[in-house]
Amino acid sequence: MAKFFMYGKYTKEALGGISADRTTKALDAIAKAGGKVNSMYALLGKYDIVLITEFPGISEVMKASVALNKLTNISFTSFPAITMEEFDRVLA
């Protein structure tokens, strides 16, 4: 499974729906798309949240991103990530 950082930006509508229940539903939507959340953080700045996830591939990340947007009104931008050890190996 590949790692993806999913950065989320709240809309006005998304702010009104913040709850632990919605977070649980979001985790379920990610699992249904074939993904796994390793950790989640609230942020200050350009993005409001980041999910550190694992997915089999890009199509599953896209499926999860659309499902999350429909569920939460949060817009996600996702980036693939590799460890520094993998990075060093790739570039060696």
Image (spheres, rainbow, N blue to C red):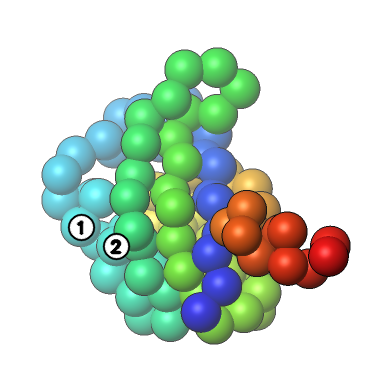
What's the residue type where badge 1 is placed? Thr
Q: Is residue 63 visible?
A: no
Residue 16 is situated, as x and y percent measured from the top left of the image, at: 31, 30
Name the quadrant of the C terminus: bottom right
Residue pointed to by mark 1: 24
Q: Mark 2 highlights which residue? A: 27
Element at label 2: helix
Instruction: Kindly indicate the quadrant of the structure image that contains residue 75.
Output: top right
Name the residue nearer the viewer: 62 or 83: 83
Q: Name the mark on residue 5.
A: none
Measured as percent of width and height from the top left, residue 22 is found at 24, 50
Check if mark 2's residue and mark 1's residue have beta carbons within 8 Å.
yes
Quadrant of res 66: bottom right
**Residue found 46% across the figure and 41% down from its top:** 50
**Residue 21 appears left or right of 67:** left
For the image, the number of numbered tags is 2
Left or right: residue 28 versus residue 68 is left
- Residue at 52%, 40% in the rendered image: 8
Type of the residue with mark 2: Leu
